[in-house]
């Protein structure tokens, strides 16, 4: 009896020690070259104009990511599990959750919805209406933002396009995907959209 209890306790301790900790994923989007040190959770930035990105995985005990640049070192807190976006670009990143509908395809929109998108985009460009509840984001340079607790969420950078369709899971759900653009891109897209609406 004592041996069985002792062996069970040992097995539980081993299982706890071997089970993976709570992970935090930090997606870094930068203007310039970046070098990542996974061991120290440090990103070294050489400022420039080219877009680069990397991903860091932090354990439960890791509480921050440090960015080293010519401007000095800056630490960004990563307090709990989830997927974060660290913006070390020279422009604000504006993003939203992609709506694939129920069939795994990006949904089409009506004229009324398009007008709503124009209004919402204009507000977002001005730093208004960003909301965790609505999954819309306005992330200024040198800041970090937690987007979701879903470890499998995907982030699409400003220079990649949203896929036309994606595979759905057995429950018919599309993957959780976020599209980000720079504020400059959003202003250009909005201007083109408004011109198209006039025709």
Image (cartoon, rainbow, N blue to C red):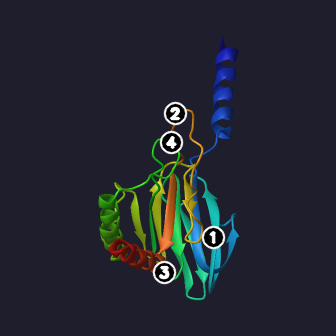
Q: Earlier in the sequence, mark 2 or mark 3?
A: 3
In which quadrant is the C terminus drawn? bottom left
Residue 127 in view, yes or no? no
Task: Pinpoint residue 13: horizontal percent, then vertical percent.
Answer: 64, 33
Q: Residues within 10 Å of mark 1 (few under 14, many from 20)?
A: some
Observer-nearest residue: 38 or 123?
Answer: 123
Observer-nearest residue: 155 or 47?
Answer: 155
Evaluate if marks 4 and 3 touch, with contact meaning CB atoms under 8 Å apart. no
Q: Gap in Å between the C-alphas at discs 2 and 3?
A: 38 Å
Task: Pinpoint residue 55: horizontal percent, then vertical percent.
Answer: 63, 63
For the point 60% across and 57% down, which residue is it?
58
Q: Which mark is residue 143?
A: none
Observer-nearest residue: 195 or 54?
Answer: 195
1 or 4: mark nearer the eye: 4
Q: Gap in Å between the C-alphas at discs 4 and 2?
A: 11 Å
Under tag 3, what secondary structure?
loop
Query: Does residue 157 appear to the left or right of 136 in the view shown?
Result: right
For the point 39% across and 57% down, which residue is it?
135
2 or 3: mark nearer the eye: 2
What residue is pinned by disc 1? Answer: 53
Q: Earlier in the sequence, mark 1 or mark 4?
A: 1
Q: Which mark is residue 171?
A: 2
Please identify the quarter of the rendering in which residue 21 is found: top right
In the rendered image of this protein, does residue 112 appear above or below residue 90? above
What residue is pinned by disc 4? Answer: 103
Under tag 2, what secondary structure?
loop
Evaluate if marks 1 and 2 touch, with contact meaning CB atoms under 8 Å apart. no
């Amino acid at each position: 009896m004592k041996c069985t209890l002792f062996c069970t306790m040992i097995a539980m301790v081993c299982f706890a020690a071997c089970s993976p900790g709570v992970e935090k994923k930090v997606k870094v989007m930068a203007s310039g070259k970046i070098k990542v040190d996974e061991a120290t959770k440090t990103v070294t930035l050489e400022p420039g104009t080219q877009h680069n990105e990397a991903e860091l995985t932090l354990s439960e005990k890791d509480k921050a990511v440090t960015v080293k640049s010519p401007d000095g070192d800056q630490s960004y807190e990563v307090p709990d599990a989830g997927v974060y976006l660290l913006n070390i670009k020279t422009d604000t990143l504006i993003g939203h959750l992609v709506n694939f509908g129920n069939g795994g395809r990006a949904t089409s929109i009506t004229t009324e919805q398009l007008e709503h998108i124009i209004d919402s985009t204009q507000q977002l460009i001005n730093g208004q209406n960003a909301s965790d509840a609505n999954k819309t984001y306005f992330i200024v340079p040198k800041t970090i933002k937690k987007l979701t607790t879903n470890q499998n969420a995907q982030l699409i950078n400003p220079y990649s396009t949203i896929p036309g369709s994606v595979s759905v899971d057995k429950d018919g759900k599309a993957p959780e995907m976020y599209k980000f653009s720079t504020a400059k891109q959003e202003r250009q897209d909005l201007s083109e959209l408004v011109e198209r609406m006039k025709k």
